[in-house]
Amino acid sequence: MSTEPCVYFNSPSGCWFGDHCRFTHVKGVAPRCRFYSGPGTCRNGSQCYFRHVDLEGPTKKLKDVITSEVDKGIASALQKLSMSSDDAKSFGSKNKTKKENDESKKEPTAEGDTRKIVWKEKSAEVDCASKLENDKPDGETIASPPEDNSCLKKEEQDTCVDKNSKMDKSGSIKCGECGKLIHMKTLPGVSNEEPDDAEDDGKSVSSTDSDVTHKYNELEQHYYHKLLSMNKDHLGFLQHDPRFHKETLCNVCGRVFGKTRHLLQHITDKVKSGSDDEENHTELLHELVLAFTTRDIGLDDDKECMDTLLLQLVASYTGDSDSSSDSNHRNLGDFFRILAMKEHLGDSDDSDYACNPWGFDEDDMFELACQGIKPWDPEAGMALAVLNGYIDI
């Protein structure tokens, strides 16, 4: 049984299915109204059977969480820099503390003596520094001790990202479908060495390197939840290729669907149902998620992403071989059309037949019309050859 509340349970007529309904019957709890986005947007108003929930509260909370996480990262970086500067100051003041400890061991007779000792030390340091500056020749500089840049290098490694990645310095990456900025909670360092080919080992991108999986985990979760809820912004790829509107089947259970959108709905329903084949359908959904995430992080381009989606969702798509098979089918139809033209080439002197651009006489076109085939269709020549007995099927 699904955990979602029943749509019709709280309506005046009630739910017709009763105890056999696959949704949860919760009294006083109705689903959220999909037409309500603010006051005055739902035409039913207070009489609506669904819940009217304002979206301002959750968005503000999300923004606060994102800004607080960014502020924490900046604060930690500033704290590291301040600690490094404090270490440098403490290193320079070690000699001074040693001298003060040595002088403190002496037992001065009066307060005036201690003040004189401290004053003499300070004046001696100033005299040494001025003497070095005066003795320095023109055009030369005294070599200063090398600074410890290990802290700065470490900060650069923590804040910099991979050049091939599309992630910005703030740790956010843009969703390629809805345009939303996904904030990454953890940013481990990425090595400049190219990883081994994932296809040779038979592993997915997420299983090759644990850092990459951990780094883009939030992006994968974003696509997973959006595809699971059939969000329309993340289903726009179905309009980019006409092959998504053809008949297809599920690679897991073999069920046939009229178009790809129905197949996606079937996959999401199986993932949420908890049935025996839930794991296999979840793996299929994960392949779709990986196709989008690898494109967004810069590992694949739009063409490779579309090829992956076609291979997973369109049963008739097998890669680049489809174009060659279609051309062969078209050439074979043209060949049978030429055969039909040769058979009836000198049978009639009618001017209408002479001007016929398809090479069929009236009898052939009538025969094709009876079969529901137009003479300008690519398969007209092959169909006529089958009807005339030239080939056997």
Image (cartoon, grey):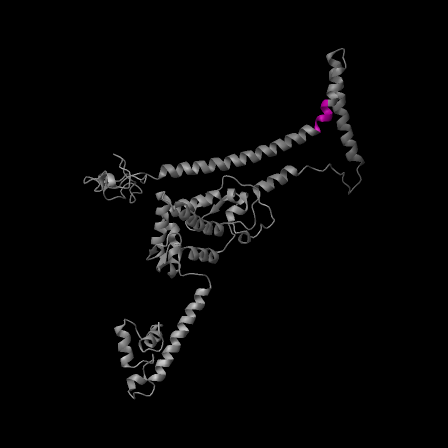
Question: As drawn, is 305 to the left or to the right of 44?
Answer: right
Q: Residue furthest front?
A: 392
Q: Residue furthest left?
A: 13
Residue 328 falls in image quadrant: bottom left
For the stretch drawn in magenta, what is the main secondary structure?
helix
Residue 345 in picture, x, y percent from top left: 34, 86
Is 341 part of what is drawn in magenta? no
Residue stretch in magenta: 92-97
Residue 3 in picture, x, y percent from top left: 32, 38
Foreground residue, 140 or 382?
382
Q: Quadrant of the N terminus?
A: top left
Q: Is residue 56 visible?
A: yes
Q: Is residue 105 above or below residue 141?
A: above
Question: As drawn, is 1 to the left or to the right of 161?
Answer: left
- The residue lying at 63 percent from left, 40 percent from top is 153
Residue 118 falls in image quadrant: top right
Residue 393 in picture, x, y percent from top left: 35, 71
Foreground residue, 248 or 43?
248
Q: Is residue 376 above or below residue 26?
A: below
Foreground residue, 342 or 227?
342
Q: Is residue 144 above or below residue 283?
A: above
